[in-house]
Amino acid sequence: MRVRLIVGWLVVLSVVAAIGYAQQPPVRRLGLAEALDIARRNNPDYLTVVANRSPAASAAFASAMALFTPTASIGAGEAWTQAGVYNLQGLSFPTPRTQGSSWNLNFGYILSGQTIANRGYYTAQLHAADQDIASSLTLLETSVRQEYLNLLEAKAQADLAEHVVAKAQEALNLAQAKYNVGQNTMIDVRSAQVDKGTADVNLLTAQGNVELEVLRVFRLLGVPAPEPARIEPTDTFPVVAPAWSQDSLVALALAQNPVLLALHARQRAASWNTRAAYSSFAPSIQASASYGRFNQTSWNQASDPVTQLPFGPDTVVKKSTGISPWNFRIGFSLPIYEQFQRTATVAQARAAEDVLDLSIRARELQVRADVSSAYVLLDTAYRTIAVQRNNQSAADEALSLATERYRVGSGSIIELLTARVTSETAATNYITAVYNYHKAIAALEQAVGRTLR
């Protein structure tokens, strides 16, 4: 009877566990390419930079139209005047009620140095906006790659923590077994228990770090994180020797870095702005044309012979309709004296151009330094991986030897636990070295301004 009861409870618990497992939502799988696509479509900072292109494109188009096409406007109006009395030197004269309407069509064109310079200025500003978008996209993609690598590293550390917990449990079981047969003391058991508890805490911390990295990834993607915050990254990255030279990377960055290209575009815009300031000393050509129609009707009323006030029904006095014929005008203007405002404008424009020249020089120096330092860090990170791999192999071998020594009674629990901590530290350092290498590549890509793999 007791056997049947135990078997029945085991069946019930198994069914409940299976139902609970089936109700858990599946873990979402996320590849780097998908993450980059989501970020491009949803990251608010990047989309803000993209939105700035529309006004720049409109300004460039408007400057081109101002250079090649005239302005055009059409106007229309309707006017009413109420009938009344006009007094002059004691005499009263009735005024008629009038109604009129008109419309006109106007064209105008101005060609000046400012108009010509605006074309080059706004075209350069549009090019700068495109480079800003490219720069923001590079920064976004690099940041997504770095966060994706942080997530992979956090998961690798969590997997290592699970492995450490299993090793700590193995050491605890071994210490308990030796205590049961009288080959050690309770001190060994308690030390192993403390070590197991420390491993459990480290595992909880590592799993919490994974969830935090998931939240950081989705914050960067610009979409809410799933609930619960668990995803499975599907991409892996090989460790290969860097195949680039420092000089070639510096040359590539100077030629293709989007931030540097945007500064060059703004420098060209500033140059056009300086030309526009100088053009204020030159004459401008103006041309205009107009055409229109009008009609007007006047009504009058019979007047009282004594009061001269209008009374009776309206009488049409006059009705006229006419055409305002085409009117053409062309001329030019030359400013002579504007209280030195043009000189001040030229000085401001030249100062802005000089500032941008200095900004380009400073940015080029910064690009050179960033690429060179990132390359050195990448080379160091790649060399560190080999050292940490050897350290991990040596630490794992030492742990195996310490475990066997403790198993046969020739080693202490302190020696075993010390070897296990050393092995855990070496494995952690190896994982850190591998992902430092991948992060160094991401930092190098950000410094250069384009992807390298």
Image (cartoon, helix red, strand yellow):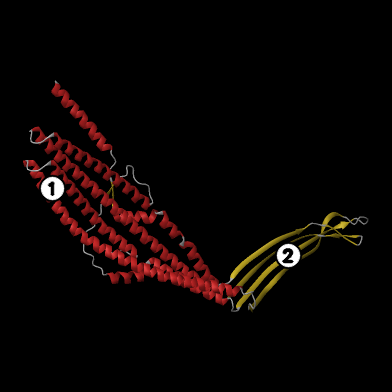
What mark, if any, has residue 158 been given in the picture?
none
Comparing 144 with 94, the one in front is 144
Q: In the displayed structure, would residue 231 be above or below residue 61?
A: above
Outermost right residue? 306
Are dots 1 and 2 in contact, CB under 8 Å?
no
**What residue is at 29 percent from the left and 46 percent from the top?**
209
Outermost top residue? 1
> Mark 1 falls on what kind of element?
helix
Closer to the chain start, of discs 1 and 2, is 2
Amino acid at pointer 1: Leu
Marks 1, 2: nearer the viewer: 1
Amino acid at pointer 2: Asn
Comparing 16 with 154, the one in front is 154
Circle 1 is placed at which residue position?
399
- Quadrant where the C terminus lies? bottom left
Q: Is residue 225 left or right of residue 312?
A: left
Q: Position of residue 18 (x, y in %)?
A: 23, 35
**What residue is at 16 percent from the left and 39 percent from the top?**
169
Q: Position of residue 105 (x, y in %)?
A: 64, 68
Q: Position of residue 204 (x, y in %)?
A: 26, 42
Q: Is residue 360 left or right of residue 245?
A: right
Q: Is residue 236 visible?
A: no
> Mark 2 falls on what kind of element?
strand
Q: Position of residue 417 (x, y in %)?
A: 16, 43
Density class for disc 1 (Cα within 10 Å; few <14, some 14-19, many ≥20) is many
What mark, if any, has residue 295 been given in the picture?
2
Comparing 226 with 244, the one in front is 244
Q: In the displayed structure, would residue 301 be above or below residue 321?
A: above
**What residue is at 60 percent from the left and 68 percent from the top?**
72
- Quadrant where the N terminus lies? top left
Real-space CA distance between mark 1 and mark 2, rounded to the nearest whole angstrom: 107 Å
